[in-house]
Amino acid sequence: MKNKFLPFSIIAIFVIIFIILYKGLQETNIYIPESKSNKEVPSLIVKLFDTNQTVNTIEIFKSDKLYLLNIWSSWCVPCREEHPILMELKKNEKLKVVGMNYKDTKKNAKNFLEELGNPYDKIIFDNKGTNAIEWGAYGVPESFLIINNKIIKKYIGPLNKKSFEEIELYTK
Amino acid sequence: MKILKLFLIIFFILPVNNLKADNEALKSKITKNLRCLVCQGQSVYDSDSEFANSLKIVVDNKINEGLSEKQIYSYFQSKYGDWILYDPLFNKNTYFLWLLPLLIFFLGGAIILKNFKKLD
């Protein structure tokens, strides 16, 4: 009885290990951050870009409207790529686009907006990049879809036609 | 009088420096255990990317706010998930990970012990 059980269990262990390793081969080992979330907007005291006024982020996102927080910078090339989409989203009355200027100088940021247009309702000034970390961001560009003080979706990297259509769908 | 002044200066500067040195040591310990999520195979401590540099400032701020090492880890874990920690915390997602080696160790021990008893 015992002699029969031993080879069987050894084979079973090898089969299990083989299956685990084989599955592991097919999985990508590149880290993919989660895009869906249900986190609250972090409560932070931030500086506004135009007025230098300090406000709490919760006050910025307090109404029941849909908000898109977009992290951008004048030195970021993909931000230029996604800018026309943000300008298009600005036209949607049910959505407010809020900007977060990441590790930038005011002069360069102003030039960027003068050249390409300003899609933002408000801009948060984050010259050290610490606010972006509080939001759980990885870099620029990155966008967060917010409703009722909750982050419902993250877009890592530049917005594209597909994400534009998805955001438009949320406003309907 | 001069000696007293010197003594006072040393008395006030020394503890502050010690405190700063402690904070620096804690900061490097924490940043070495945080994975730079936008780099490949580097810790936040080793990396000079924009993401890592901002994270270092946040770690500094959190230490100054008086948060403990564990609190800082759970803070980053809540923002970026378990993946940011090289040394994952003990929670319901990692019970298996932490306890499996122990389980295997005891199981192996039990088998060896049983065989020894048989030999006797």
Image (cartoon, coloured by chain):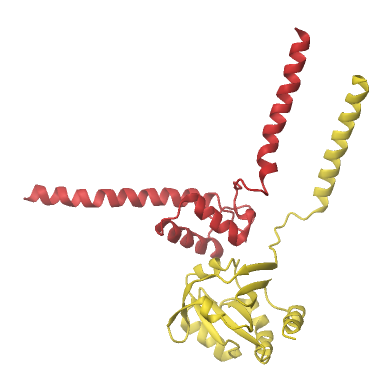
Q: Nearer the viewer, residue A68 or A107?
A: A68
Q: Is residue A113 left or right of residue A88?
A: left
The red one among the chains is B
Q: Is residue A74 visible?
A: no
Q: Identify whether A5 is placed above or below A49.
A: above
Q: Is residue B103 left or right of residue B69?
A: right
Q: Identify whether A68 is placed above or below A92.
A: above
Identify the residue shown where x is 55% and y is 49%: B33
Q: Position of residue B52 (x, y in %)?
A: 54, 60
**Numbered circles on residues, count:** 0
Q: Position of residue A111 (x, y in %)?
A: 52, 87
Q: Identify whether B109 is placed above or below A74.
A: above
For the view shown, which residue lies furthest in the left direction?
B1
The yellow one among the chains is A
Q: Is residue A167 visible?
A: yes
The quadrant of the rendering that contains the C terminus of chain B is top right
Identify the residue shown where x is 66% and y is 92%: A93
* Rendering quarter of residue B80: bottom right
Q: Is residue B106 left or right of residue A1?
A: left
Q: Position of residue B61 (x, y in %)?
A: 43, 61
Q: Position of residue B97 (x, y in %)?
A: 68, 42
Q: Is residue B92 left or right of residue B115?
A: left
